[in-house]
Image (cartoon, rainbow, N blue to C red):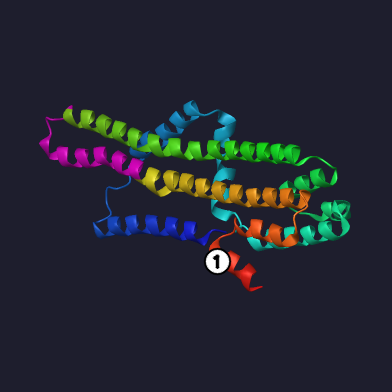
Amino acid sequence: MDIGSIVGAVLGWLLVFVAIAMGGGRGFLNIPSILITVGGAIAATLIHYPLPQVTAVMRVARKALFMKELDYMKVYEELTDYAVRARRDGLLALEGDIEKIEDPFMKKGLQMAVDGNSMEVLRSVLEDEMAAMQERHIIGQGIFKALGNYAPAFGMIGTLVGLVAMLQNMSDPASLGSGMAVALLTTMYGAMVANLVALPTAGKLEQRSQEEVALKTMVLEGIVAILEGHSPRIVEEKLRAFMPPSVRNKTVKE
């Protein structure tokens, strides 16, 4: 679970609600404004993306918030162990361990290496899989970015609708102030949906995608180095290049 995302979301909404409460708290809830802003943004997103992709967006959001931290050390230890055994006993010695590998990407790569595929074929297949993964991630990011773009726009539309309704009632000057307040609420709702929900989630998904690509690239280069017959020390150095400095320092100390 990403504690930072949850703390940030709770803190952001809490600060807004506290500020509203300190200002009196009355008149900030308007159902028609919410319908225009949130409903309109969702409708525009449905036009922008196919329905199955939009309905799957909750799984994407859950991945951003509850994805486990990537375990670089586990990957490093597994691949260095495979490098030692492959150098000592040959690649075929790893065949019995492939079924025990939890990571499907590493499992596929080592299986291809043991099956005797060339380095060019192995790299091509795994890079294609990484590219397909990135495309799927881009769609999830794009849905939240679209929602973040449309929410303020529909907030402005709601404000214009409210202003038109207010100006049509100019015969009652006492109602102008409250009418203007209601008209501006849609702009506030749009900004809140965009900046506290949609755009931060899109940014988190983009970051997660980059982290997954980095880890898979580490796996790919490690398997290629093993397939090419490099010494375990060289494999270790190749793997360290993809690790965050804090994790890399642990491997050096060990």
Which image quarter holds the N terminus? bottom right
Q: Is residue 89 visible?
A: yes
Residue that appears at 39% across and 43% down:
194
Residue 134 drawn above or below residue 219:
above
Considering depth in this image, is 4 or 132 the residue closer to the camera? 132
Secondary structure mostly seen in magenta is helix
Considering depth in this image, is 209 or 174 the residue closer to the camera? 209
Which image quarter holds the C terminus? bottom right
The amino acid beneath tag 1 is Ser
Q: Position of residue 81 (x, y in %)?
A: 77, 62
Residue 182 drawn above or below residue 100:
above
Q: Quadrant of residue 25?
A: bottom left
Residue that appears at 73% across and 50% down:
223
Q: Position of residue 246 (x, y in %)?
A: 55, 66
Q: Secondary structure at mark 1?
A: helix
Magenta residue check for 88: no
User: Image check: 104 left or right of 21?
Assistant: right
Q: Position of residue 77 (x, y in %)?
A: 72, 63
Residue that appears at 32% across and 36% down:
155
Q: Position of residue 235 (x, y in %)?
A: 70, 57
User: Image check: 26 left or right of 79?
Assistant: left
Q: Quadrant of residue 88?
A: bottom right
Q: Which residue is mark 1?
A: 246
Q: Is residue 71 visible?
A: no
Magenta residue check for 184: yes
Q: Which residues are magenta?
A: 168-191
Residue that appears at 85% across and 52% down:
91
Residue 173 drawn above or below residue 168:
below
How many C-alpha atoms fall within 10 Å of the one at disc 1: few (<14), some, or many (≥20)?
Answer: few
